[in-house]
Image (cartoon, rainbow, N blue to C red):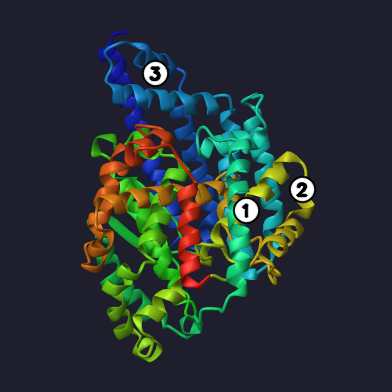
Amino acid sequence: MTIQEALDQYNSWKFRLSAYEMALSIINIDRMTVAPSDGSAYRDERTAYLSGEKFSIETDPSILPVLDLLIGQPGVDSDIRREAELYRREFMKIHVIPKEEYVAFSKAATSSYDAWLKARQNNDYSIFEPHLKGMIEWQKKLYGYRKSDRPLYEQMLDDYEPGTDIAFYDRFFDRLKERLIPLIQKVQNAEPIDDSFLKQSFPEELQKKWTSDVLLPYLGFTKNWGYQNETEHPFTAWTCENDCRTTTRYEEYNMTAAIFSTIHEVGHAWYEHNVSPKFDGTILSTGISSGMHESQSRFCENYLGRSFPFWKANYTSLQNTFPDQLRDIPLEQFVRAVNASKCGLIRTAADELTYPVHILIRYELEKGLFGGSIPFEQLKEAWNDLYRQYLGVEVPSDCEGILQDVHWSDGSFGYFPTYALGSAFAAQFYHRMREEIAVDNYLERSEYCTCIDWLKTHIHRYGALYPAAKIMELSTGEPFNPGYYLDYLEEKYSRLYYL
């Protein structure tokens, strides 16, 4: 086989694979936003079939020698070689799974999501519990086909953040516990910041109008490449650089929930939109590590979105939209309130200081669940115990406890730790960005996209061309250092609470 013949076969294979990925992405977006619930059984069966057809393309044995040739042959373009390496890595993980079992798992995952949604609506974990157990058993079975010597949970962690393992995350979370738990205790003992005005009634229709007319334009999220919808648990999905879909969730008595979930999800969308267009339809666009992706959403949500300059540009319009609620609240008080720290129950509503503890809890639960120290039957109890231990709060309901996250419904075990890792990545990026550009000035002048341009130049455009560690060094000039994250949180919350 000549190089040209290999490239022709490879490009045809990539195109077919990307077509199924696009179709399944759009179906999934529809399922989680506007699709009627009574049609779920029909959709789930056919979605599983399409997943199986995609699986057949991914694991076509004829593509393996093509990938090997492109990896090993001198003179092959370096981008193509990197693509081929990543495709081969994924091939080796899944080709050992029987197709019928992959299809059955896909169907079980969509049914599990439907059960999770119903359980949420009824505040009843027992509806979801058997499906969650099924997802755990499915993952044990599917990973078992790899016949790896590594512990199961380490394989899961590595799938979401290549190069990580339990020892890596143990060290990471130990550092967070050492410095953040005492700080959280000091903050809880300090004079509280009054954020009660944020818990008034903020009509959802007015929230939606402000988001559409003010927030999304400020963020640069335009309709020619992006679209926002609503869902139970906000997420972002995409088919290519110019088709990025975000979702949010509006709550009448928690107005900031939709604001910060919107900024967070648009951060994800910007990452995908800014990946080099030459990577569209390839694994270099879709194979970015979860930690790196979460670093961008957390960066936009917190390091930019909760800052004083961000709100200096946007607060007047918010006051004008909600004059009865915010007329007498000065900008400084509002910004302090949206950064207030309280030990709460809900991860997505958590402040920056307590947020990594929510992730720590999920990490310890997953590690115990797959390591054997937490029996599945005691998972809910373990969840409640860890919230009591780390945050000192009692879990009053399933919706505010074990049912609050969607991730486990499709078997995404090992994903949660990347939220905390991404937050730490973001601190290092933020430190470097502030050395190079006048971040505050751009935010105040409604030039938010100038900050995004910095991220595009240093991070986004590469997609998965390089591992996360190399992107970190290219963008900041040094290896990953969680000290930036800890220093940032200590400085910010010591200042906010006059410690």
Residue position marked by numbered label 2 in the rendering: 374
Q: Amino acid at mark 2?
A: Ile
Give above or below for 213 relative to 196. above
Which part of the image, by quadrant, shows the N terminus? top left
With respect to residue 13, does 261 lie above or below? below
Residue 27 in sight in this render: no
| Residue type at tag 3 | Leu
Residue 182: x, y in percent? 63, 61
Q: Position of residue 54 (x, y in %)?
A: 45, 34
Q: Residue at x 37, y 48 (%)?
A: 429
Question: Quick one: label 1 or label 2, which is nearer the N terminus?
Answer: 1
Label 1 – label 2 distance at C-alpha: 21 Å
Give the Cα separation between the discs numbered 3 and 2. 41 Å
Amino acid carrying mark 1 in the image: Lys
Picture quadrant where residue 99 is located: top right
Kindly identify which residue carries mark 1: 177
Distance of label 1 from label 3 (alpha carbons): 44 Å
Q: Residue furthest top?
A: 1
Quickly name the residue at label 3.
Answer: 67
Query: Looking at this view, is 67 or 100 the one in front?
Result: 67
